[in-house]
Image (cartoon, helix red, strand yellow):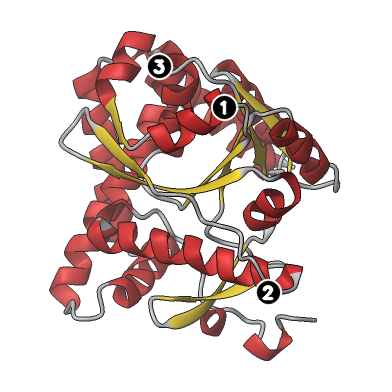
């Protein structure tokens, strides 16, 4: 389709052209694109504001507008950085990222225990991944949702693999088994895990309303004995990005597998909510998230 070829071409242009721009020019371009999109008040911007209204319930229209504008700038900063990450040196990555309490991850891996890092859509998870692979020298495995056109999905896979990540397709049913094997071998798995619209998602309380999140991180921890660690990221003044690795989410001693998964996924949601509440402008959620915002009714979610 013409639209698919155009989409793939635009992303290809981003990876090739933006990478060559001087830093100040790339940053200025990102802000300009973000501000233009914000002024047009498209569906993504309106949805971002609606989502932020739940996160910051006391915010009036002016505050929400400020947050959504900052949010779009943060979102475009993510893209500008991501287009340029393959050309970043290990030294630049180390200087640009500061992650607190990384010992939760490194101590477990040094002891031969697998680790699942579970993140929300905050700041730049790709940059955090490069920090893990290039600064710490730790390879990891992740999954990627299949995109249309297929050539665009291939671009994303090649891009992330160039950054030192093993990327598995989300669809097809084999990703979970491969992730479990990596964890049993004492490896690291990183998953963006704050939005799941499938019927297999786990319902959680999120900022006072029901949402659905993936069961995968909790199930992997239960089945493999891996450590489950929530992670939050946020931007500081450029060029810095900060992060916090929370203490492990423990597997409950009693309960069915479903009950344990529910408790553990709620713990992830609580950790995410704390980070998002502190840095709402860096939360890149331009889609529907809460069940009462979806076309499907909450009572249908278990079917």
- From the image, tell me which residue sits under label 3: 135
Residues 247 and 291: in front is: 247
Number of residues whose C-alpha sits closer than 10 Å to that of mark 3, classed few (under 14), some (14–19) or many (20 or more):
some
Give me the C-alpha separation between circle 1 and circle 3.
20 Å
- From the image, tell me which residue sits under label 1: 111
The residue sitting at 57% across, 64% down in the picture is 264
- From the image, tell me which residue sits under label 2: 259
* Secondary structure state at the residue bearing disc 1: loop
Quarter-wise, where is residue 128 in the image?
A: top left
Number of residues whose C-alpha sits closer than 10 Å to that of mark 2, classed few (under 14), some (14–19) or many (20 or more):
few
Q: Report the mark closest to the observer, 2 or 1.
A: 1
Q: Report the mark closest to the observer, 2 or 3.
A: 2
Give me the C-alpha separation between circle 2 and circle 1.
29 Å
How far from the left and from the top, in percent, is residue 165? 60, 24
Q: Is residue 43 above or below residue 226?
A: below
Quarter-wise, where is residue 297 in the image?
A: bottom right
Residue 186 relative to residue 250: left or right: right
Q: Is residue 183 above or below residue 292?
A: above
How far from the left and from the top, in percent, is residue 103? 39, 32
* Secondary structure state at the residue bearing disc 2: helix
Number of residues whose C-alpha sits closer than 10 Å to that of mark 1, classed few (under 14), some (14–19) or many (20 or more):
few
Residues 70 and 39: in front is: 70
Q: Report the mark closest to the observer, 1 or 3.
A: 1
């Amino acid at each position: 389709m013409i639209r698919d070829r155009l989409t793939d071409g635009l992303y290809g242009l981003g990876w090739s052209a933006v990478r060559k721009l001087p830093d100040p020019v790339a940053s200025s371009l990102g802000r300009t694109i973000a501000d233009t999109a914000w002024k047009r008040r498209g569906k993504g911007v309106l949805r971002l504001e609606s989502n932020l209204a739940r996160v910051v319930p006391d915010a009036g229209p002016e505050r929400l507008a400020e947050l959504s504008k900052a949010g779009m700038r943060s979102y475009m900063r993510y893209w500008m950085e991501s287009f340029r990450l393959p050309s970043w040196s290990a030294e630049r990555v180390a200087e640009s990222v500061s992650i607190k309490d990384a010992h939760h991850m490194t101590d477990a891996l040094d002891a031969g225990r697998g680790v699942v890092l579970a993140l929300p859509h905050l700041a730049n998870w790709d940059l955090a991944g490069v920090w893990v692979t290039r600064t710490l020298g730790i390879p990891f495995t992740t999954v990627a949702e299949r995109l249309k056109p297929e050539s665009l999905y291939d671009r994303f896979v090649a891009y992330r693999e160039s950054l030192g990540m093993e990327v598995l397709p989300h669809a097809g049913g084999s990703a979970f088994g491969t992730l479990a094997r990596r964890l049993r071998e004492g490896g690291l798995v990183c998953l963006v895990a704050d939005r799941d619209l499938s019927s297999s998602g786990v319902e959680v309380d999120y900022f006072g309303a029901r949402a659905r999140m993936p069961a995968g991180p909790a199930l992997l921890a239960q089945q493999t004995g891996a450590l489950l660690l929530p992670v939050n990221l946020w931007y500081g003044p450029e060029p810095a990005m900060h992060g916090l690795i929370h203490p492990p989410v423990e597997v409950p001693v009693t309960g069915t597998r479903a009950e344990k998964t529910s408790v553990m996924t709620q713990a992830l949601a609580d950790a995410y909510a704390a980070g998002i509440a502190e840095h709402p402008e860096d939360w890149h959620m331009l889609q529907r998230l809460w069940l009462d915002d979806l076309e499907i009714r909450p009572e249908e979610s278990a079917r």
